[in-house]
Image (tube, coloured by chain):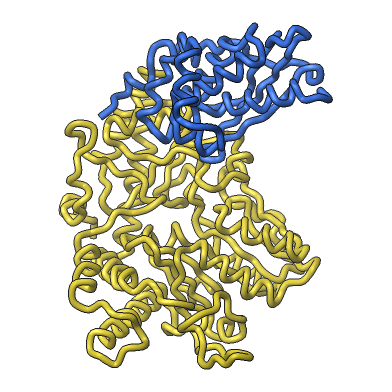
Amino acid sequence: MALDVARIKKDFPILDVEVHGGKRLVYLDSASSSQKPRAVLDAMDRYYETTHANIHRGVYSIAEEATRLYEESKTKVARFIGAPSARGVVYTKNVTEAINLIVYSWGRANLREGDAVLLTEMEHHANLVPWLILKEERGIELRFLPMADDFSLDLTDLDRLVDGVKFVSVTAMSNVLGTLTPVRRLAEAAHAAGALIAVDAAQYVPHISTDVVDLDCDFLGFTGHKMLGPTGIGVLWARDELLEEMPAFLGGGEMIRDVRLDGWTPNEIPWKFEAGTPPIAEAVGLSAAIDYLSALDLEAVREHEVSLTAYAMRSLTERYGDDITFYGPSEPSMRGGVLSIGFKGIHPHDISQVLDEEGVCVRAGHHCAKPLMRKLGVSATARASFYVYNDEADVDALADGLESTARLFG
Amino acid sequence: MPGLEDLYREIILDHYRNPRNRGELDAPPAARVEGFNPLCGDEVVVYLLVGGDGRVADIRISGQGCSISQSSASMMSASVKGKTVDEARALIRAFKGMMSIHEQRLDGSEDDAADAAAQSEVKMGDLEALQGVVKFPVRIKCATLSWNTLAQALDEATAPNA
């Protein structure tokens, strides 16, 4: 069933905000961070107003209720990504911390000098810099699957590149190009090579129905604030047996079973990886976000985004022809709702500045993917990205704003 | 609420469309310094030749960036040509003062009064067109990129072994 975007828009209080003297807010930067529906804001307010206490400690009623809400959110997360149980769900601060956890815990315990890890040229800095740090520390080898001319992942040399690697870590969807990568195929290749595979699903889980068993991945990271939830909460899902074997990452309260002056023993998973007071209110918000997305139905969300992306590419091309460049796959069904554009050679900062005057929010810059930008041969792009609350009128506002940009700089 | 006309003054757009002193110089003898804006990936390369008389004999700018960083670099190059090294440094100080006092503090330089004095003593001329950038805080780094790079180039050109 198609999304009723007019009704959905009403659920997001921020979309009533007017900017620059009465301009409607046209929010096209959800790939950076999504907006929050009233249901999420209310759930978090209600939690703080009625229930807040630290979890896993108090024996009093509100502490027990807070603990229940926190653990319930993990069950919802597990169900949302098709995970067999909530034991594999670790809360982190964001997906960046989730990947750092993999690198610092699994990577340090298992990788030695000369061991190889396979990434792609499309990675966000979050799935590149932690590996570069480990490379400096351990002398591991990093290999990269290249981007093809059509902006897809080039698998021509996959067999050669994956041969002998110990670990594969790939994005499921490029935050710059929108390219969907063949995760299942990569998982198959990784496992055939005797390697594990981690998936950076920050841009994937919010938009596409996800099943970790079906994807056959070993680790999956994503973040709450890109899926209608609050900032400050990310998820690392991993297979139970991997988490069992991995050493602790951050030390402190909560992650221990016992502490003596001469040592400590770790808590059970997943709490072994959650040192200190976790993001409790954020977990409550994430629960509400998952409920909201589930009620919309992820299949309908995906369908909506494919059709809106197709409309955007079609209408911008009709209007601007060769003056507009799309950095990403040309077929909407092969990509996410992320549209990186070049326009008449005008710098993306200037495009974004003029669009802002019209109330249109897009992202300008390198999108934390500098190696990819170098490969594209540009220092920056302007990026519009779509979510459940965007409609064709928002795309039209973008197209109109580009005309203002052309008038000023053309 | 500041409007686009505060930012994109006609003179700024003119320098953007027709950048002055665009190109390269042989380095050495010229000093060559690259500047990066890590936020947006903009880059500027300043080639600076200081003559035996202690004046900026020639300056060239290359690199890429937005209209603000490009026009600021162009205006910078036009305004320091022929100036003594000390005059150029005073102009950098005055320009950065005009952009933002806080930026100056982050750079570890001195107090507000000294900045104000530097600003009042130096004729900014066309550069004043860039004053509107202050109302768009994210863009201040675009405007100051070439000036910070010039400061480094001046240091290099006047270093004892240069």
Residue A308 visible in the picture: yes
For chain A, what colour was chosen?
yellow
- Left or right: A214, with A198 as reference point: left
Report whether B104 appears left or right of A37.
right
Depth check: give the residue in front, B49 or A282: B49
Q: Which chain is blue?
A: B
Q: Residue at x 33, y 80 (%)?
A: A54
Q: Residue A315, percent across and down?
A: 34, 34
Q: x%, y% of residue A172?
A: 51, 60
Q: Is residue A105 above or below residue A308?
A: below
Residue drawn at 34 percent across, 51 percent down: A305
Check the image and report above or below for A60 versus A290.
Answer: below
Q: Residue A255, position in %: x, y?
A: 50, 83
Does residue A285 appear to the left or right of B73 in the view shown? left
Name the quadrant of the N terminus of chain B: top left
State the image coordinates of residue A196 (x, y, percent, origin top left).
63, 73
Quadrant for the C terminus of chain B in the image: top right
